[in-house]
Image (cartoon, rainbow, N blue to C red):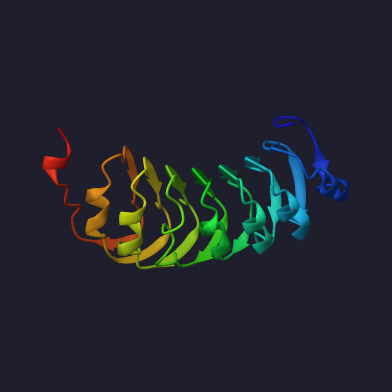
Amino acid sequence: MSMNSLHGELPHEFVHLRRLKVLDLGVNNLKGELPLWIGSFSQLRYFSLTNNSFTGLIPSSISNMSNLATSRLSYNPLQGNIPPGIFNISSLKRIALLRNGLSGSLSSDMCFHLPRLSFLLLSHNKLSGPLPSITLAQCSELQALGLAYNEFRGPIPKEIGDLKKLKWLYLDYNYLVGKILINASDYN
């Protein structure tokens, strides 16, 4: 149902669609806060509400989406911290939260439970603090890391250079210092 002219808030009746596997309502005119019942979609694999006007916080109940592979909530004026539970959904491959008003820092154990994560796109937010070095080494499947246009500070973690599958790296417009060291013997 993406790219239509849907408007208003998410209908509460959606809560009854418990076996739903794909929910793509991107590029519409939907608004309001994301309801707590959004986490009742435990079978959901693909979740996209990108390019709408959702406000408020990302509900912590999103961590109940235990089969989720893709979460796309970009281009909404969402605020607050990224719920830490989202980083415990081991089936997640793609997280896109670009161009929101999200704040807070990234958890030091962010990648410990995300063995399949290939895309982590968090650019154009208000995220801050240091980049967690230990956790990035755990993101061994990472192909795209977008952290540009935030307020991250401190050294660039050397572990970024160890991400063998990384193809796209966006760290610009932060307050980071240092070099990215790449182990050339890993790239034949």
Left or right relative to 3: residue 152: left
- In this view, 54 is above or below 168: below
Indicate whether 24 appears above or below 110: above
Q: Position of residue 124 (x, y in %)?
A: 48, 52
Q: How many marks?
A: 0
Q: Is residue 161 left or right of residue 63?
A: left
Q: Decide which of 134, 122 is in the foreground and name it.
A: 134
Q: Which of the 4 image quadrants contains residue 49?
A: top right
Identify which residue is drawn at 64% across, 42% down. 47
The residue located at (56%, 42%) in the rendering is: 69
Q: Residue furthest left?
A: 185
Q: Quadrant of the C terminus?
A: top left
Q: Would residue 21 appear left or right of 161 to someone viewing this image?
A: right
Q: Is residue 103 left or right of residue 176?
A: right
Percent position (x, y) of residue 45?
63, 40
Looking at the image, residue 76 lies above or below residue 166: below
**Percent position (x, y) of residue 89?**
55, 54
Residue in the foreground of this view, choosing between 79 and 119: 119
Where, by quadrant of the figure, is residue 25 drawn? top right
In-front residue for pair 110/32:
110
Q: Which residue is at 81% across, 47% downward? A: 10
Residue 51 picture location, percent across and down: 64, 41
Q: Which of the image's four quarters has the N terminus?
A: top right
